[in-house]
Amino acid sequence: MNYQDINEEYESLKSRIEAKKTNIKAIQEKIGTLKEQIVVCNGNIASIRLSGMSSDPTAQANLKRNEEEKKKYEENIRALKKELEKEKASIVPLRERVNTEVEKLRSDPETKRHLDAVIQKKLQRSMKKSQKEKDELAKSKFKVESLQQFVKEHPSVANNIKGMITANQELSKLEKELDTINKSTNQNDMHRKVELENILIPNAKAKYDNNKGLIQSTLQSVLKNKGTIISMEDIMKFVEEPVKTDKKGSINLDATFEDRINNYRKAIKKADEKITKNQIALDLVEKPYESEMTNNIETQEQAQTQEQEQIQGQATTKIHWWNFLKRFKAWRGKNNTPALPEPTEIEDKNKRFRDDLKYSIAQDYTKQAMRDLDKQARKIMKNADKEKNDNNEESEER
């Protein structure tokens, strides 16, 4: 397929569409401005009439002028609206021609197979990234849960963590104040600066370090006796993040733990949903090629069966669909044949295809395909959730 010719026409059409969109926006802005001017005219007209001075010659002239201006603005708006509708209508055939150019990619089996393989790789990368995020979130959640258990087993650590949190909050506030003073030219702030640098900030750091030292001692003792996955770095990270407080403003450590764990749980669920969504999209991309392979295998098996029947002179039993599926999967695994060509092979070994991806029509094709797949996957997940909820409701009624 000659991408260059198709891409030139595609870009020309897109450029014309963008120009029309720009013009449409300009027309809409003009209409908006004229409507604002009509509002002003209406206000002036109402003001003159309410003032009781409509019989005054000057007032009459102003009234007439505002009414004429209002009429002129309304006429201009009507004309602009006609122009607007004309511009909007003119975009439709251009979009149809754009779709025709894109359809040329779909209608060429080799090109579509290649672009679908590119989409496959994008989905695989996204899944890998989401899985990595999920693993990191699960690890962080487990750390917080372990720290929560550690605090329950060593109540003194709870007070030390609260002490670190209080000191950290105080230190952050004091350092922010000092930064503001350093940027100021007011000499009256010098006394406060000295106090911050020599007394308040060092005291806050000492309080932080003292509580940290006590926790480290407990950690070392636990490590020596039975071990723990909790490190001082985990505790310091916990201390630096937002905390929950009670009505009196005191730190609520239990609520903070539960809030952090719940947030990780939600984030893990979100990552899981993204993985599922991408897996569904990936299945949708691969499905046509799997069907193609299935048909090829069926054809081969039918030919072999007919040959055996002719040789043996006897009928064979039809293969059950589940046995066939089992054989198909085994065949695919044995031959290591993917439903789509490996994207890496396309990128590394086929320079022509790699160059084709530089064209905007190919890039837009893959982007739109990704959006369509995402939409389909979301719909499938939504229907699956609905079906699950309906089944749960039926079970409860029984």
Image (cartoon, grey):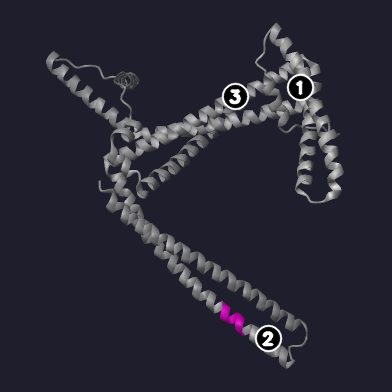
Q: Position of residue 202 (x, y in %)?
A: 81, 31
| Quarter location, residue 52 | bottom right
On screen, 40 above or below 16?
below
Query: Does 71 lie within the magenta span?
Result: yes
Q: Nearer the viewer, residue 78 or 230?
A: 230
Q: Mark 2 or mark 1: which is in front?
A: 1
**Of labels 1 and 3, the one closer to you:** 1
Going from N to C along the chain, the mark reached first, 1 or 3, is 3
Residue bearing mark 3: 138
What is the crowding at mark 1: few (fewer than 14 residues within 10 Å), some, or many (at least 20)?
some
Tag 1: amino acid = Lys
Image point 57% across, 78% down: which residue? Answer: 73
Work out whether mark 3 precedes mark 2 in sequence or the reverse, and give the earlier one.
Answer: 2
Give the residues in magenta.
Answer: 68-73
Which is nearer the eye, 89 or 259?
Answer: 259
Residues packed near mark 3 inside 10 Å, few (<14), some (14 to 19) or many (20 plus)? some
Front tag of 3 and 2: 3
Farthest residue, direction top: 225
At label 3, the amino acid type is: Ala
Q: CA separation, marks 2 and 1? A: 79 Å
